[in-house]
Every structure is written in C-alpha cells, then in structure tokens.
C-alpha cells in the first residue's frame, strides 16, 4: 500500500457494502461519517475481550471513529457517530501499535476500522518490522471480501460480529437488509486468510477467527439460526463467542423491545441450543447481562504523542 493507491481508493469510496462513492480524499465524509484522514478515540490495554485475547495483560485496542453500519443500539455510539476522535497519520498509527506492544499488549486490536482499511494496511506495513505480536481485526462484519484482501498477510486474527440472521432485523436496526449474506461472505474470506485456529504456549490465540454474536432482547430464535449456520458451515474451524452484554442505551421510539436487557432465561436457552448443536469451540459470559465496564472512556488516551 502506498499513498497514491490510498488516495485513489478514497476518491470514489466503495470500500464497504454501502458503496457510497464519496470523495473522501477531498474531505467529504462517506456514509461512515469520515473523510480519508484517520480518526481514533482511544488506544490502550483492554481486559474485556475473550480470555484467549486479553490474557493477563490485556489486548492493545485501537478504537477508530465512525462506522459503516451504525446500529441503533450501538454501545459505542459516541465514536460510531463520529462525535469523538483525534486525527492522526498512518505513521502515527504505526507508532501507536508499537507503543501498545511496549506496554505489554498481547496483541494489537483494531476496532471498527472498515472505513480506514487502506490507511490501516499502510500503518501495519510501516510497523511490521518491529511488531512481534498478533494483529486482531475487530469488525461488525459488514465488509466486502475484496476490501478485506488489503489486509492479507497483515492480520493474524479476525474478530467478526454476526449480528443478525433476519433481513427484517438487519434492515430495522442497521439499515442493512443484505447484512447476513454479506457478513458470511466476509467470514469466509477471513477464514481463507487465517486458516484453522492456532494457540501459543500460554493458550493465547495467535491465528484464527472468533465470531461474536450479541444476543438481542426477544430475539433468541434469530440467535439460534445464526449458531446453526455457523456450526454447519465452519464447525470447529472457528470459535464462537455468545454474548449477553447487550446494554440499553436510552429510549428507542418504535423499537421499544430494545429498551430492556437480555434475560438470564433467554441467554440460558441460547447456550443450551449451542450445546445441543455440538458447538465445543466457544465462549460464553458469566455474571449479569448488563455492564458498562465493557465500554471504555473515549477520551483520546494513547492517541496523541506524549
């Protein structure tokens, strides 16, 4: 990746399935709300990922501003809507990767960077000679396979969501009726790049895929359809993380079903279904279903040079 190629990709942006065509190179925001200039809201050690990623010292997370999916219930809405963030260059981003490594991060965790894929690829290429820990790409999965190929050889672990099976739900909550098949295609591309999971001597994931599914209130049937499809197609080649941390973020006129948390009974039903399917490579969450501890302060920590 070079600056000339990066600019050409930004001039008529079709990086994500929205294909909005915005000239982000000239400073015009795309559907994601961002121009071609990287903006980040936080970089630091994060202990709330799956144990094989967080380990004992934490995952080195970099939270990018903007989003191409914009779910109505988003827990990170301050950065997803572009209200929070600091502009940096690809070179500064590469420095952040190395600074997180120096702080003891088990990996570099790139959170919601779809709309900055070329810039991230450039930053990783700059950092790679000095970067000796795995790189994690953490995404909503509303991705184009051809765009993900920009990361081939640069990302070791993919951490994709699989939010919806139902077209009706993905249209209602994320204005993306094509979400499920688009996300499945993206996961297939991720698996092509990483292959089967591999762990280091400490039990930390060094290569592979963990597909996350966040259960939504009242949607256990949709969750079960997602788990069935993932298990039928990928079996033990991926890990599945079944999450109960849905946090109501205010009122939702016309979508009042989102104004409550996921009940313990709902979560238990989905876990029992996963067990009955034979899913063995997976993670589940213990404790209460709602916690703001999963949401860090997006205050610019670790972004600007000391």
Image (tube, rainbow, N blue to C red):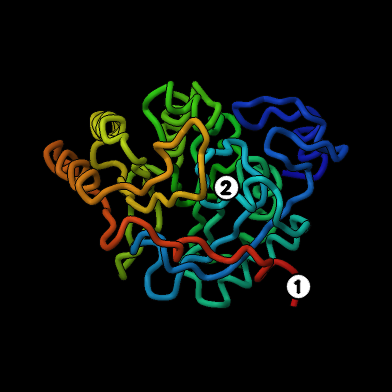
Q: Nearer the viewer, residue 226 or 12?
A: 226
Circle 2: element type: loop
Do the numbered discs 2 and 1 sit on residues whose CB atoms are within 8 Å?
no
Q: Is residue 276 left or right of residue 84?
A: left
Q: Which of the marked residues, 2 or 1, is nearer the chain's N terminus?
A: 2
The residue that appears at 56% across and 54% down in the rendered structure is 110
**Residue 51: quadrant of the picture:** bottom left
Q: Residue furthest left?
A: 276
Which dot marks residue 305? 1
Q: In the rendering, at what x and y percent does residue 24 appear?
A: 80, 36
Q: Is residue 130 left or right of residue 171?
A: right
Write down the residue under mark 2: 112
Q: Is residue 142 above or below residue 295?
A: above
The residue that appears at 31% across and 34% down in the rendered structure is 219
The residue that appears at 47% across and 65% down in the rendered structure is 59
Q: Quadrant of the N terminus?
A: top right
Q: Nearer the viewer, residue 38 or 301?
A: 301
Cα distance between the residues tagged 2 and 1: 22 Å
Q: Nearer the viewer, residue 163 or 21?
A: 163
Q: Residue furthest right?
A: 26
Q: Residues within 10 Å of mark 1 (few under 14, many from 20)?
A: few
Q: In the rendering, at what x and y percent does residue 34 appear?
A: 74, 42
Q: Quadrant of the C terminus?
A: bottom right
Q: Nearer the viewer, residue 160 or 6?
A: 160
**Residue 236: quadrant of the picture:** top left
Q: In the rendering, at what x and y percent does residue 290 appear?
A: 37, 57
Q: Residues within 10 Å of mark 2 (few under 14, many from 20)?
A: many
**Residue 163: quadrant of the picture:** top left
Q: Is residue 146 above or below residue 153?
A: above
Circle 1: element type: loop
The total number of labels drawn is: 2
Q: Is residue 118 left or right of residue 193?
A: right
């Amino acid at each position: 990746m070079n600056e000339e190629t990066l600019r050409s990709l930004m001039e008529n942006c079709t990086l994500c399935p929205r294909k909005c065509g915005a000239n982000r190179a000239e400073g015009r925001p795309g559907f994601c709300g961002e121009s071609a200039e990287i903006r980040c809201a936080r970089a630091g050690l994060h202990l709330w990922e799956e144990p094989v990623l967080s380990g004992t010292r934490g995952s080195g997370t970099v939270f990018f501003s903007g989003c191409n999916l914009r779910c109505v219930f988003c827990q990170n809405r301050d950065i997803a809507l572009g209200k929070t963030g600091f502009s940096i260059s690809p070179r500064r981003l590469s420095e952040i990767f190395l600074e997180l490594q120096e702080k003891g991060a088990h990996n570099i965790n790139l959170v919601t960077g779809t709309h900055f894929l070329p810039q991230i690829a450039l930053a990783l290429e700059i950092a790679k000679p000095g970067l000796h820990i795995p790189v994690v790409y953490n995404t909503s999965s509303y991705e184009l396979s051809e765009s993900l190929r920009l990361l081939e050889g640069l990302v070791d672990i993919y951490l994709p969501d699989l939010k919806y099976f139902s077209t009706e739900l993905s249209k209602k909550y994320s204005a993306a009726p094509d979400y499920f098949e688009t996300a499945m295609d993206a996961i297939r591309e991720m698996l092509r790049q990483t292959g089967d999971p591999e762990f280091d001597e400490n039990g930390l994931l060094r290569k592979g895929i963990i597909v996350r599914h966040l259960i939504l209130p009242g949607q256990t049937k949709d969750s079960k359809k997602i788990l069935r499809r993932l298990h039928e197609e990928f079996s033990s080649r991926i890990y599945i993380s079944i999450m109960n941390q849905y946090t109501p973020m205010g009122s939702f006129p016309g979508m009042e079903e989102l104004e409550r948390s996921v009940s313990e009974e709902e979560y238990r039903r989905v876990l029992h279904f996963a067990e009955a399917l034979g899913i063995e490579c997976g993670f589940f969450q213990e404790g209460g279903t709602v916690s703001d501890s999963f949401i860090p302060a997006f205050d610019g920590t670790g972004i600007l040079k000391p």
